[in-house]
Image (tube, rainbow, N blue to C red):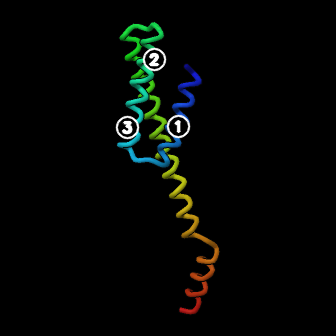
Amino acid sequence: MLITAFIAAVISIAAGASIRAWAFAFFAFLVAIGFGSVAFVEGSSVIAAILSGIAMLALMEIGYLTGVFASGLLRRNSRLRENNSVADTVAAASERQQG
C-alpha cells in the first residue's frame, strides 16, 4: 500500500504540472473508486474500503496541488531570469548614460 501511495503521489505531482484540474479530478476520482474497490475485494469492510479510497483521493489532490505550485514557481523564476538577463541590464545602463 505504501508503494501504491508513493506512485500515486508522484503521478499527481507530474499531473499538476501538465494537465487541467477537471481532467485530473476525473482521473483521481476513478483511481480512488478503483483503490476502494480493490480494498473491498481483498476483504476489508465497506467502511474501511471507502475510507481508503477517500485517503487515496486526498493524497492525490495534495500531490496535484503541490505540482501546480511547483510548476508555477519554476515558470515564474524562469520568466524573471529572462527579464533580468545581463544583456538587458547592460543595454539599460548605456541608455541611461546617454539620455
Which is more N-terminal, label 3 or label 1? 1
* Badge 2 density bin: few <14, some 14–19, many ≥20, Cα 10 Å: some
Q: Amino acid at mark 3?
A: Ala
Q: Amino acid at mark 2?
A: Val
Against 3, residue 66 (above or below) is below
Q: How far is mark 1 from mark 3, CA to CA?
A: 13 Å
Label 1 with label 2: CB-CB less than 8 Å: no
Q: How far is mark 3 from mark 2, CA to CA?
A: 20 Å
Q: Nearer the viewer, residue 26 or 52?
A: 26
Which is more N-terminal, label 2 or label 3? 3
Label 3 with label 2: CB-CB less than 8 Å: no
Q: Position of residue 7 (x, y in %)?
A: 56, 31
Q: Residue 37 falls in which quadrant of the image?
A: top left
Q: Residue 44 falls in which quadrant of the image?
A: top left
* Residue 25 appears left or right of 86: left
Name the residue at 63% across, 77% down.
87
Which label sits on residue 11? Answer: 1
Q: How far is mark 1 from mark 2, CA to CA?
A: 19 Å
Which is more N-terminal, label 2 or label 1? 1
